[in-house]
Image: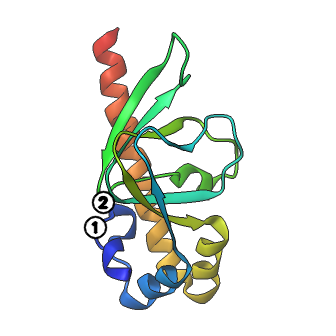
Amino acid sequence: MAEKFGRVPVFAGLDEAALGLLATRVRELKLAAGSLAVREGEPGNQFYAIDAGAVRVCKNFGRVDEVELARLGQGQSFGEMSIVEPLTRCATVQTVSETVLLRLSSLDFHELYKAMPAQYSVLLLNIARELSRRLRRLDGVFAALH
């Protein structure tokens, strides 16, 4: 399982021991096409890495003003914000094909913090970089529309 994390940017630079610790805690979730992995407005404390398949990330899901923010595929992730700050989900994530997700909770990440604080710091820096990349992309999209 640890080798699957190697494809996920959030886990870049973590050593084998840290990846191994997370691998012992990961849960695999298989979803059919069209399933909802997370819903906007619901509480969330789980992170997901896409092992296979693809998802779409949407605001106002199912409404006339629905906006698709992103499409993510194998090796990408979502739910990072709920690990950093335990607030409600800010978007809905729907599978666009049969999808296999690797799920970790905020408690799983806390175990990494307790066991290997330096590795946890690498993880948090990676999450910050990933969120920054997404914000830059959305800023570009927003600017192009206005």
Secondary structure beneath label 1: loop
Q: Is residue 137 above or below residue 108?
A: above
Label 1 vs 2, first from the N-terminus: 1
As shown in the figure, which amino acid type bears the numbered disc 2? Gly
Q: CA distance from mark 1 to mark 2?
A: 5 Å
Q: How is the image coloured?
A: rainbow
Q: Amino acid at mark 1?
A: Arg
**Residue that appears at 50% across and 79% down:** 22
Q: Nearer the viewer, residue 146 or 38?
A: 38
Residue at horizontal 44 percent and vertical 60 percent from the top: 101
* Residue at the (69%, 42%) spot, across then down: 88
Q: Is residue 108 left or right of residue 42?
A: left
Which residue was labeled with disc 1? Answer: 7
Above/below status of 28 relative to 135: below
Query: Crowding at label 2, few (<14), some or many (≥20) Cα neighbours within 10 Å?
Result: some
Q: What SS does tag 2 mark?
A: loop
Within-10-Å neighbours for mark 1: few <14, some 14–19, many 20+: some
Q: Position of residue 104 (x, y in %)?
A: 55, 67
Residue 132, given in percent of the width and then of the height, sits at 40, 45
Whether pointer 1 and pointer 2 mark residues with C-beta atoms closer than 8 Å, the reply is yes
According to the picture, the residue beneath numbered tag 2 turns out to be 75
Point out which mark residue 27 bears. Answer: none
